[in-house]
Amino acid sequence: MEEFWKNLKFAWKYCKDQKSKLIKYIICNIFSMIISIVIPMLSAKIIVELTNNEFYQLILIAIAIFLIENLRNIVNNSGRYFAQVIYRESFINIQTELGKEILKLENKIIDENSSGTFIQRLTNDTSRLADIFNVLNIYLTKIITDIGIFGAIFLINKKVFLFILIAVIVLYIIENTRVKKFNEKDKIYRRKHDRISGFVGELVRGIRDIKMLNAEDSFIDEMHNKITDLNYERYKMQDVDRKFHLLRGFTRDLTDLLLIILLVTLIINKELTVASALIIHNYSNRLPSIIDSIGILLEKVKDFNLSSTRIFNIINSDKFKKEKFGTTHLPKVNGDFEFKDVEFAYDKEKVLDKINFKIKANETVAFVGKSGAGKTTIFNLICKMYDINKGEILIDGININELDKDSIRGNITIISQNPYIFNFSIKDNLKLVKKDLTEKEMIEACKLACLHDFIMSLPDKYDTIIGEGGVNLSGGEKQRLAIARALIQKTEIILFDEATSALDNETQANIQKAIDNMKNEYTILIIAHRLSTIINCDRILLLNDGKIEIEGTHKELLKKSKIYKELYESEIIDKKIN
């Protein structure tokens, strides 16, 4: 219970702005509760009047029931309206908050968890959290209504009340046991559901590669195994339900039989009138209702606790660590930065070993080296996507750990080999980085990125929807769109992570032209697979075994570095072969 109150307090902060509607909703349920207590009395009265041939009274009672039932329909409809608004607003608040917190997570945490972990918590768990106040109101109202009915039975006959109380306790024990066993299975089920959601996400995002690899059968087999395992867990949950429902059904039927025998015995002994027995019998039909309500409420509460824990873990716990930034704000950086004795490792795999280098503002500098040398890691550390283990990274002479998020990521753009393009129009993809983007700014950026002519050739031009991940664009078009985004963002530092490695010569020339358009106005860092694209860089830094082995211009490195010369000559040979 302590856990529930803690989680309820946690959920309340997302619902408290709907306090007035929650109060109105509770009032509606109180009216409905009172009506639910009165109706069985009137229904029993009808049977009594029928036996007494009081037909005029019978009509009046029927009219009263009609009016009361319609009043209940109106009240219930109002209650449903308030419930929907409360749920809608609470769900928006919780889901938005959780989305913000997920975006704050350390990349290491994201790497360690499947996408399903976050998808399920953003959808199913937030829904359960938002619905808890409606759930409590509905089922507590039902339970209180039934308690009121049993209070009426107590006033009519204490022996019958005692019998029904014992029956309710027995049924409660059965239901509580069912809920406990069910939720033990549910925890396992949810963990497996997270994993399969992540797997399905991978399948959908990687569908083209799966086809090209001719790996459909392997993926289908894997999906079949995961789905089978998941549904076996679901079956075990349903098996618990099935067995306990059978036991509860038998207990309820036995209770009904024994109640009738008790009522008949009391009538024979003149301890109960027939009219009172009819009222009690009408009320006794609520016996299964109170157990159902208690059972569902217990199940919902345990479900709510589990969802709250899963959401709370992301928002507040150390299990899902958040990125940490400083408080110093730089509205605009010059573009100078420095690595001083920087060490970094992914888990225990050391990638950078006391690396040192300086970059001056508006320089164009390239990083080269064999695969795994640490080039992309440097870019990730510059953007503070990971925290270094030792050393310092300085931007404009300030330690990166002292700067706030906007000072770093608001001044740095990274363009990867396969930049992620969202399933929006071209215009909306560009507006992501500047909400008040003007048409003039948009066109200028796309012209500099050598993309405008291509966009104007499309039927819907800048309003063209480009598909999930930019599926309707080629690799070069996606990269040029990413360059246009960077130009609109006007960051002082632009990082190209092997942005031309998989492109044809014509597309590479367009990308190179786009980069040349930005030279001397931005600090540009390039990770290059094709060394021919970086010949004109101000400096080239060669990485080897996690360190800067040598730096210089293209001509200087050809003379001084055996590794660089071998990389360049192997590229020339590859071109001749192809």
Image (cartoon, rainbow, N blue to C red):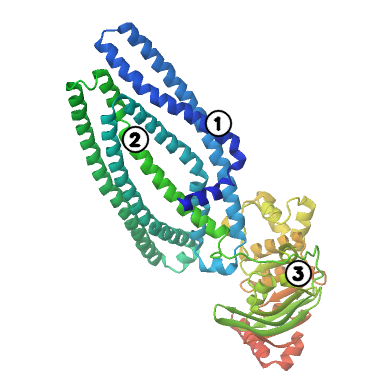
Q: Nearer the viewer, residue 454 or 374?
A: 374
330, above or below 238, in the image: below
> Callout 3 environment at 10 Å: few (<14), some (14 to 19), or many (20+)?
many
> Callout 1 environment at 10 Å: few (<14), some (14 to 19), or many (20+)?
some
- Residue 113 appears at what percent x and percent y? 50, 65
- Residue 13 appears at what percent x and percent y? 59, 47
Residue at horizontal 52 percent and vertical 51 percent from the top: 6
Indicate the quadrant where residue 66 lies: top left
The residue at which mark 2 appears reads as 289
Residue at horizontal 52 percent and vertical 32 percent from the top: 25
For label 2, the SS is helix
- Residue 360 appears at what percent x and percent y? 81, 77
Numbered marks: total = 3
Tags 2 and 1 touching, CB below 8 Å = no
The residue at which mark 3 appears reads as 493
Residue at horizontal 35 percent and vertical 36 percent from the top: 290
Q: Measure the alpha-carbon separation of dots 2 and 1.
A: 25 Å
The residue at which mark 1 appears reads as 24
Q: Measure the alpha-carbon separation of dots 3 and 2.
A: 66 Å
| Amino acid identity at mark 2 | Ser
For label 1, the SS is helix
Question: Disc 3 or disc 1, which is closer to the eye?
Answer: 1
| Amino acid identity at mark 1 | Lys
